[in-house]
Image: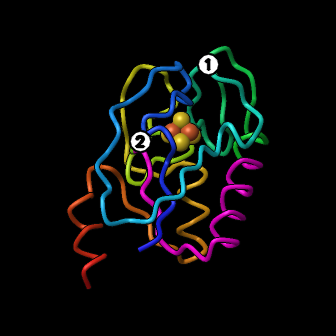
Amino acid sequence: MKILVSACLLGCNCRYNGEALESLDLEGFEVVPVCPEVLGGLPTSRPASEIVGDRVLSIEGRDVTQAFKDGAKKALDIMDKEAIKVALLKESSPSCGANFIYDGSFSGKKIGGAGIFARLLTERGLEVFSENQLDQLKARKNE
Ligand code: SF4
């Protein structure tokens, strides 16, 4: 199964703070790594951002909504071009969060919700899993 994966789940140091996460073991999948925020033109490292109402704001108060939307659209275009219907995305990110996001107060509190890219995929009827749903994704592959 071909899947799109948040690049930071594959050890890329594209996270806002430049830290690399341990790579997930995705043996058996054909993986296309993408970082929507980098595609949107944001640098690494960059200030933390959170969704506040219908905007995305950096911790410094800069409105980065357009960069997040542009990156989400470019990442979706890659999925379309590669005929990918399933994504594995980093939970809680303002772009990639599949089930949870930070609440917009920059206090570390999470709430139910999805990031800008994850929302776009769901609206398009594409399947989204987080790294916490890896077992479900592997079960889906074997269907
Ligand atoms: S969570 Fe998404 S946007 Fe953030 S670094 Fe990972 S791939 Fe990029």
Quadrant (top left, top right, bottom left, bottom right) of the C terminus:
bottom left
The kind of residue on which mark 1 rests is Ser
Which image quadrant is residue 94 in? top right
Near-viewer residue (134 or 102):
134
**On screen, residue 17 above or below 38:** above
Mark 2 beta carbon near ligand 1 (under 8 Å) = yes
* Residue 8: mark in rendering: none
Residue found at the very far top of the displayed protein: 60
What residue is drawn where x is 72% and y is 30%?
42
What residue is drawn where x is 46% and y is 20%?
19
Q: Is residue 37 left or right of residue 33?
A: right
Magenta segment: 69-90
SS type, badge 2: helix
Callout count:
2
Near-viewer residue (84 or 42):
84
Residue under pointer 1: 45
Q: How is the image coloured?
A: rainbow
Residue under pointer 2: 9
The kind of residue on which mark 2 rests is Leu
SS type, badge 1: loop
The percent coordinates of residue 51 (x first, y second) are 58, 38
Which image quadrant is residue 73 in? bottom right
